[in-house]
Image (cartoon, rainbow, N blue to C red):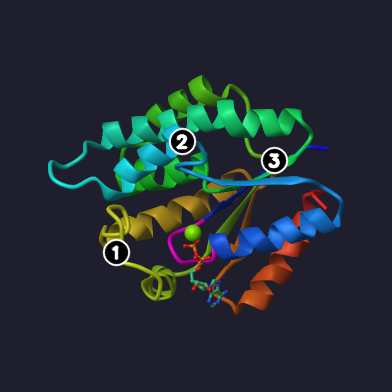
């Protein structure tokens, strides 16, 4: 049966690394998977991602940022996510709407009302079957991500921004425990993966 699984967390906590691990587990269990990411996952979405992460010059308004996130998401649902779910596949996505609540809602302090309206408009009642929040202190994420590449427009934000983002993810997991699971991502990779496997079993994905 098709399931929609999303991975969330601040930069450097291990989303991309663990996506492959989850894909392998699902494939071993006999599922076919589509692995994708947000913002992005389509031609238009990747073009919007480029603007969102690398726009320079005149500052982008928080509302414009929010609307572009959902424009990319609408395209992603239409072209990739919904067709894959309809075809009975597992969809694994590196970030989704919980990231919008965390980054634009809490990081940019736009609040949740506008996001909830857009979520209903763009997604109807579609929500991920499972969201795994990889949680680690912001300095842990930063030191891991720092080894990787130059910071993008959003990664350049200050500590208090990322602290709000992390706190928001933790609150979302508390509020929606039936579909959002928190994993301690500060531990060594092997222990993070043990927790992820347990979550996949507990939420009856595997
Ligand atoms: N549990 C872990 N312990 C130590 N290093 C890790 C762990 N998980 C991921 N990493 C490393 O941290 C860096 C960032 O991981 P990545 O998966 O790209 O994070 P994200 O996609 O969340 O930004 C990579 O170099 C990765 O190998
Ligand atoms: Mg990543």
- Disc 2 C-beta below 8 A from ligand 2: no
Residue at the front extreme of this rendering: 43
Residue at the bottom extreme of this rendering: 188
Q: Is residue 199 visible?
A: no
Quarter of the image where one finds residue 58: top left
Q: What label sits on residue 43 in the rendered view?
A: 2
Question: What span is colored magenta in the figure?
Answer: 9-14
Q: What label sits on residue 92 in the rendered view?
A: none
Residue in front for this viewpoint, 59 or 30? 30
Q: Position of residue 138 (x, y in %)?
A: 40, 68
Q: Is residue 144 left or right of residue 184?
A: left
Residue at the left extreme of this rendering: 58
- For mark 2, give the secondary structure: helix
Sequence-first disc among 1 and 3: 3
Q: Is residue 175 left or right of residue 194?
A: left
Sequence-first disc among 3 and 2: 2
Q: Residues within 10 Å of mark 2 (few under 14, many from 20)?
A: few
Tag 3 residue: 129
Q: Position of residue 205 (x, y in %)?
A: 79, 49
Residue that appears at 18% across and 47% down: 56
């Amino acid at each position: 049966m098709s399931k929609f699984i999303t991975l969330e967390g601040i930069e450097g906590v291990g989303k991309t690394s663990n996506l492959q691990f989850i894909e392998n587990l699902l494939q071993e269990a006999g599922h076919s998977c589509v692995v994708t990411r947000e913002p992005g996952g389509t031609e238009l979405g990747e073009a919007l991602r480029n603007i969102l992460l690398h726009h320079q010059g005149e500052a982008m308004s928080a509302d414009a940022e929010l609307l572009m996130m959902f424009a990319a998401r609408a395209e992603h649902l239409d072209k990739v996510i919904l067709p894959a779910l309809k075809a009975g596949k597992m969809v694994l996505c590196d970030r989704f709407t919980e990231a919008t609540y965390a980054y634009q809602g809490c990081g940019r302090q736009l609040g949740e009302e506008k996001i909830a309206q857009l979520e209903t408009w763009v997604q109807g009642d579609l929500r991920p079957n499972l969201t795994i929040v990889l949680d680690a202190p912001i300095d842990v994420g930063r030191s891991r991500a720092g080894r990787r590449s130059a910071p993008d427009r959003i990664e350049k934000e200050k500590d208090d921004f990322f602290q709000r983002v992390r706190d928001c993810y933790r609150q979302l997991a508390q509020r929606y425990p039936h579909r959002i699971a928190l994993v301690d991502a500060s531990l060594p990779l092997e222990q993070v993966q043990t927790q992820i496997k347990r979550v996949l079993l507990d939420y009856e994905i595997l």
